Image (tube, helix red, strand yellow):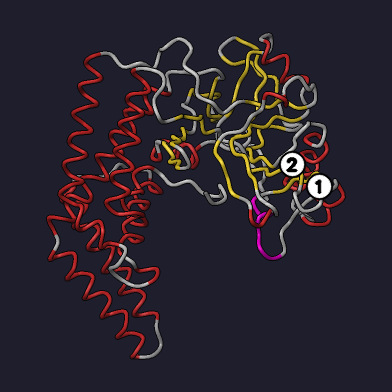
């Protein structure tokens, strides 16, 4: 598989891959339900930590030297690869805390016996705090939006208090050069434990107490939800397969559907009734293409985008029932995904909070990643995490 620079949300798979994406989503959701019922399912789940920045590190296969960097180490031209602390200052000048975090990453991660190339999310460097939460003293760190809290007197808390750097690895790479590497989800961190300066967290989801298991009522409820999702997908199948062929370039219909759904997430509002969404999408499409046409200087360019607009609106109107079932399928997948997320959220090894003006507010983890063979999809309550992203106080300037 390609580099792990971006994971798609499970509901977006129907817009990216048409009906095949729908089959993928149903298969993932079915096996996630099986996993909560009994171990040994074909799908594996990892916790999505809200870390920042993303760190790539290990031995550069082209020269054998240890390096760190961001995702830009994979660039085909002018990759930004840090082989020393001085490199961080040279390659990332005047970028504040980002530069320092990359220097610290090189200093401490180079002490670990990393033999290949790993990707992870940085959790803390020198920005840990000792605070009182709910009457208990905790070691806290806030790499991005979520505040992670570990009781100070626990084994994990004692390790965290000693560590100079915390990171969670989730992806392993192999290949002859950094530019030609392939990603494999998962990372063996067994040899990276026991180092005082570095605390390597596990991303693997573990439900030791079976608290996330479904009872009989929940199993039936979830099965009905999947049946409804599969039914709407079948009715949308032919339409889904032509979405990516309708429109041009950035105005391809499947891309515009994704942008349209994202407008609700950015506003922090739930998706409304399916029929209203059809009307809203028609208006969104018309306004977007009209604005593009009006921005052009020549009449031929204006005419080009007006033709795309007319053709697109005609396509939507002629396929109103298929548009309905496409939107219904999207909403059904979100509902099934949210059902799974709520079960997975019951398992907590480390406290997660939002820092607000009124103190610390309990929140859920950022989300989870479902992995099957070489495929992986995000399970994130996008609306909830979007609200948190906009309202929670941040801890550092990411440059």
Residue 150 vertical placement versus 60 (above, below)? above
Percent from the top left, x then y, of residue 156?
Answer: 67, 15
Nearest-to-viewer mark from 2 and 1: 1
Percent from the top left, x then y, of residue 378?
Answer: 44, 39
Around disc 1, counting alpha carbons within 10 Å, would you say few (fewer than 14), some (14 to 19), or many (20 or more)? few
Task: Based on the picture, tell me whether residue 76 belongs to the magenta stretch.
Answer: yes
Asked which quadrant contains residue 229, the reply is top left
Look at 41% across and 23% down and name the residue there. 344
Around disc 2, counting alpha carbons within 10 Å, would you say few (fewer than 14), some (14 to 19), or many (20 or more)? many
Asked which quadrant contains residue 281, the reply is bottom left
Q: Is residue 230 left or right of residue 107?
A: left
**Between disc 2 and disc 1, whose residue precedes?**
2
Look at 68% across and 44% down and name the residue there. 56
User: According to the image, label 1 marks what residue?
Assistant: 64
Residue 81 vertical placement versus 141 (above, below)? below
| Residue contact between numbered discs 2 and 1, judged by CB atoms under 8 Å | no
Q: Nearer the viewer, residue 312 or 4?
A: 4
Q: Secondary structure at mark 1?
A: loop
Task: Based on the picture, tell me whether residue 230 belongs to the magenta stretch.
Answer: no
Percent from the top left, x then y, of residue 196?
Answer: 79, 21
User: According to the image, label 2 marks what residue?
Assistant: 58
Residue 48 vertical placement versus 87 (above, below)? above
The stretch in magenta equals: 71-77
Q: What mark, if any, has residue 173 been given in the picture? A: none
Give the distance between the C-alpha atoms of the residues marked 2 and 1, in whole angstroms: 9 Å
């Amino acid at each position: 598989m390609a580099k792990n620079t971006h994971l798609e949300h499970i509901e977006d798979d129907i817009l990216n891959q048409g009906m095949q994406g729908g089959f993928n989503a149903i298969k993932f959701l079915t096996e996630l339900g099986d996993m909560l019922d009994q171990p040994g399912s074909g799908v594996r789940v990892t916790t999505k930590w809200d870390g920042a920045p993303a760190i790539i590190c290990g031995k550069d296969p082209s020269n054998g030297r240890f390096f760190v960097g961001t995702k830009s180490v994979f660039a085909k031209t002018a990759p930004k690869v840090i082989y020393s602390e001085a490199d961080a200052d040279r390659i990332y000048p005047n970028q504040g805390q980002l530069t320092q975090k990359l220097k610290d990453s090189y200093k401490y991660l180079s002490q670990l016996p990393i033999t290949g190339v790993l990707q992870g999310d940085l959790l803390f460097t020198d920005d840990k705090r000792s605070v009182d939460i709910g009457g208990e003293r905790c070691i806290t760190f806030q790499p991005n939006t979520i505040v992670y809290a570990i009781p100070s007197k626990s084994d994990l808390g004692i390790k965290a208090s000693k560590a100079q750097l915390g990171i969670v690895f989730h992806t392993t790479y192999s290949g002859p050069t950094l530019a030609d590497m392939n990603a494999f989800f998962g990372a063996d961190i067994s040899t990276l434990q026991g180092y005082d300066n570095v605390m390597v967290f596990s991303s693997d989801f573990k439900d030791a107490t079976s608290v996330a298991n479904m009872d009989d009522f929940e199993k039936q409820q979830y099965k009905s939800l999947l049946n409804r999702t599969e039914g709407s997908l079948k009715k949308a199948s032919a339409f889904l397969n032509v979405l990516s062929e309708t429109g041009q370039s950035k105005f391809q219909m499947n891309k515009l559907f994704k942008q349209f759904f994202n407008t609700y997430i950015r506003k922090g509002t739930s998706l409304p009734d399916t029929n209203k969404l059809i009307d809203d999408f028609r208006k969104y499409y018309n306004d977007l293409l009209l604005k593009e046409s009006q921005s052009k200087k020549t009449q031929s360019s204006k005419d080009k985008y007006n033709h795309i607009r007319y053709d697109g609106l005609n396509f939507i109107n002629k396929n109103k029932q298929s548009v309905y079932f496409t939107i219904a399928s999207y909403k059904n997948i979100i509902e099934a995904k949210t059902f799974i997320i709520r079960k997975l959220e019951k398992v907590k090894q480390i406290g997660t909070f939002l820092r607000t003006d009124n103190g610390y507010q309990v929140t859920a983890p950022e989300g989870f990643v479902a992995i099957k063979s070489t495929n992986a999809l995000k399970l994130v309550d996008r609306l909830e995490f979007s609200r948190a992203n906009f309202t929670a106080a941040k801890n550092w300037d990411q440059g």
